[in-house]
Image (tube, grey):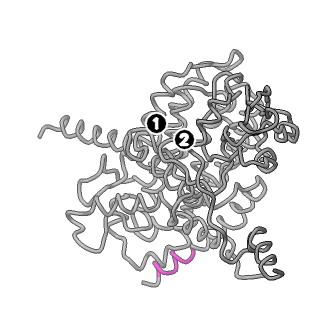
Amino acid sequence: MGVPGEGLAKGLAVTLKTMTRRSHTQQYPDVQPELPPRSRGVIALLEENCTVCMLCARECPDWCIYIDSHKEEVVVPGAARARQRNVLDRFDIDFSLCMYCGICVEVCPFDALYWSPEFEYAEHDIRDLLHGRQRLGEWMATVPPPPAHDPRGEPAKEETAARKRAGSA
Amino acid sequence: MPDWLETLIRVLAVVAAFLTLPLLVGQAEHKVMAHMQGRLGPMYAGAFHGWAQLVADGVKFVQKEDITPRDADRPVFRLAPVIALLPYLLALLVIPLGPGDLVGQPLDVGLFFVLAVVGIGVVAVLMSAWASANKYSLLGGLRGAAQLLGYELPLVLAAASVAMAAGTLSLTGIVEAWRPWWLLWQAPAAVVFFVAGLAEIRRPPFDMPIADSELVFGYLTEYTGLRFAFFLLAEYVGIVVIAALTTVLFLGGWKGPFGDAHLGWLWTLLKVFAVSFVVIWLRVAYPRLREDQLQRLCWLVLVPLALAQLVLTAAVRVAF
């Protein structure tokens, strides 16, 4: 038990203190929000890196990645026989299904998929949320450079491995 | 200057105050409440920090369809918003803004008149509640009746204390008799008057008759458009009137640190806005009182306090 009316005074103090502080409202359409690093806005595709391994499409939990491809023969001079190469015909991500888990980005072994912080791609028709290869490629321009390594964090796996190799050699 | 012209100017000035002060208070409420909750409040209407929000609201209300429920008691239903609004206009008429003649209509029984007129608000609540033919309205109206009749008593007792101290019922006379040490002497009466006044205008935390989380919107449930806007306006004018009355009765009206003769109106307005700010502040800080807590506060705290204040006032008056 404190002084009677203490709670009442405290209530007044809290509201008054809040009034003197800056409000938390973000005036979004007028002022662009400051997104945290590694924001998941939209998935960008770097087509040159894609080998059509289909890992992303298979790992996607709600199957929203559609990939079509065909094989082409590449004649390498001097080689015994022509090599085969996958050529991408279609790479679509349906953002009306995507749940932004980022598994496709994680799983891609050739760094063909990236997170971009762009989020303003709402559509009037849900079918327009199916981003084709062209559109996904355009998002690449908005992909930020990877954040610097945390100086106090654990060293990268590659660094540790390299150091170990150097030590053992 | 002929008499009729002077009367006309005074009435027009009061009407102007009646139309602008509540809007200022309403806008302040939007903004103060927002910032107390860490928000910004209206930002678009009128381009600069939403200064025209209430004007925009008014325009919106005018455009809305005016609905009278089929089972409603039509004339009573339609008259209620006017009855809610008009008493406050009359009250503003006799509240002095500055020394001497700076008052809409100097009245010897000003205090009596103001209290009587503000009491009409109860009738408006009952009219709207009963005529709406709606159970929520009726419940809200009954709560309102219990609350308003109860709180009328401490309100009048507290006002009587200051009238006794000043030895006059004229509001101008009370301010003239007022001395700074009354702030201490009449402090309990000031608190009682302010709290009872809040309850009289049904402001949160005393908004049990409206209680939007349980009674839809209490006695306002069936109102739309301009009639609803009238009730909302009545609430804001109510804040102005209660703040002005508290200022005039307990805070020394136009008496300020300097230049009372010329700057009196400024001191009065400053005090009115300061008290209005407290009204808004209380709304943000406190949750609604339950019905039994409401009655308990009135009958077991405010009424005894007001009576004790009366005794104190009488004792000091007799002693000096």
Instruction: State the residue at coordinates (53%, 57%).
Output: B35
Query: Is label 2 in a helix, a strand or a loop?
Result: loop
- In magenta segment, residue A19: no
Asked which quadrant contains residue A76, the reply is: top right
The answer to which of B5 and A18 lies nearer the viewer is: A18
In the drawing, what numbered circle is on residue B86? 1
Q: Would residue B78 be found to the left or right of residue B177 on screen?
A: right
Asked which quadrant contains residue B262, the reply is: bottom left
- Residue B135, percent across and down? 77, 31
The answer to which of A72 and B39 lies nearer the viewer is: A72
Instruction: Let me know if residue B166 appears in the view.
Output: yes
Which residue is label 2 attached to? B120
**Amino acid under disc 2:** Ile
Query: Is label 1 in a helix, a strand or a loop?
Result: helix
Q: Earlier in the sequence, mark 2 or mark 1?
A: 1
**Amino acid under disc 1:** Leu
The answer to which of B314 and A81 lies nearer the viewer is: A81
The span shown in magenta is B311-318
